[in-house]
């Protein structure tokens, strides 16, 4: 083989090893990468000056459905990026934390930690039903979680979307899902997170009728405390499941994520 052929083969091998998933046209609130992973749309927004001394800290955001994350997260994301924290997510559909959705989070986690140099301890950020998705993934992977933060997060399938609606995502009936709640419902699967002392934070409105405080963030705080791992819970009086800036321009949430991201 000639020198030119050897160089060409080396170049092709290097290109194949560093190839990235195909890009998509997903709209993001800030400049970043949108790509397909496992046939599902994902995104990564990197800070302008990422950490070069070690792995890049990052936030795993959910739900990454069409139109999400939205401009509502822009304030928070800008400040995280300014401190060197990346943000990423993958569209797992209306999975409600089912095994198929968790497997997609595994794919994203493996890609970002192994191929893109991101930290092995992301901070999970679940907005609304994103709480079901991130907490379900974390329940069996506490060693991969730096912290959990929620914006009126759903923590109990019985509260939202209800077992009748969630059953299909788990490939069973309402009765079948009810019998499997100890294995499927985030609020019933907190032992590993508490044992690992994973820091947790949530901000929730006391008039939330869609994702009631008591059955979700309130229950999460009570159960974690009973397991010896108290969480930070900020209750916004008079607020519902809405777009109030108290949820999205939240200094306590920002400080928690920055403190836990490493």
Image (cartoon, rainbow, N blue to C red):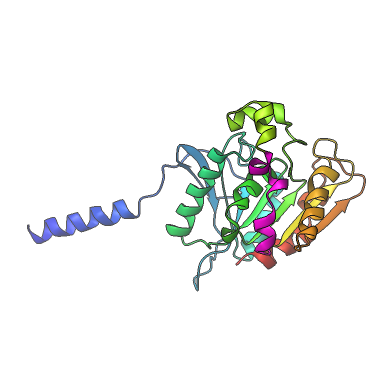
Instruction: List x then y, in percent, for residue 258.
Output: 68, 65
Span colored in magenta: 181-198
Instruction: List x then y, in percent, for residue 165.
Output: 69, 27
| Residue 69 seen from this side | no
> Which image quadrant for residue 101?
top right
Q: Residue at x 60, y 31 (%)?
A: 169
Residue reaching furthest to the bottom: 53
In which quadrant of the rendered image does the C terminus lie?
Answer: bottom right
191 within the magenta span: yes
> Which image quadrant for residue 64?
top right
Q: Residue at x 73, y 44 (%)?
A: 155
Instruction: List x then y, in percent, for residue 253.
Output: 75, 58
Residue reaching furthest to the left: 1
Q: Residue at x 82, y 56 (%)?
A: 233
Residue reaching furthest to the right: 238
In front here: 240 or 201? 201
Q: In the rendered view, would you say 154 is above or below 179?
A: below
Q: Residue at x 81, y 35 (%)?
A: 210
In which quadrant of the rendered image does the N terminus lie?
Answer: bottom left
Instruction: List x then y, in percent, for residue 175.
Output: 69, 27
How many circles with numbers are drawn on the protein? Answer: 0
| Residue 165 seen from this side | yes
Classified by dominant secondary structure, the portion drawn in magenta counts as helix
In front here: 168 or 242? 168
In the image, taking residue 120 as reference, residue 123 lies left or right, namely right
97 within the magenta span: no
Q: In the rendered view, would you say 144 is above or below 174?
A: below
Q: In the rendered view, would you say 70 is above or below 75?
A: above
């Amino acid at each position: 083989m000639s020198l030119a052929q050897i160089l060409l083969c080396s170049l092709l091998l290097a290109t194949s090893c560093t190839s990235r998933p195909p890009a998509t046209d997903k709209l993001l609130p800030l400049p970043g990468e949108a790509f397909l992973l496992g046939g599902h749309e994902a995104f990564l927004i990197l800070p302008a000056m990422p950490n070069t001394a070690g792995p890049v800290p990052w936030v795993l955001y959910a739900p990454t459905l069409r139109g999400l994350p939205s401009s509502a997260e822009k304030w928070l994301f800008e400040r995280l990026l300014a401190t060197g924290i990346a943000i990423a997510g993958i569209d797992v559909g209306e999975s409600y934390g089912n095994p198929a959705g968790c497997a997609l989070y595994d794919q994203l986690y493996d890609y970002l930690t192994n191929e893109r140099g991101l930290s092995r301890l992301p901070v999970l950020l679940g907005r609304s039903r994103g709480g079901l998705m991130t907490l379900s993934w974390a329940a069996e992977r506490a060693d991969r979680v730096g912290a959990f933060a929620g914006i009126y997060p759903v923590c109990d399938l019985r509260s939202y979307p209800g077992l009748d609606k969630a059953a299909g995502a788990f490939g069973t009936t309402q009765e079948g899902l009810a019998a499997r709640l100890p294995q499927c419902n985030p609020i019933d699967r907190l032992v590993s997170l508490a044992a690992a002392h994973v820091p947790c934070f949530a901000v929730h409105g006391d008039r939330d009728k869609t994702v009631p405080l008591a059955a979700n963030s309130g229950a999460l705080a009570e159960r974690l405390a009973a397991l010896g791992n108290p969480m930070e819970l900020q209750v916004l009086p008079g607020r519902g499941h809405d777009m109030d800036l108290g949820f999205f321009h939240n200094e306590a949430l920002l400080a928690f994520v920055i403190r836990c991201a490493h």
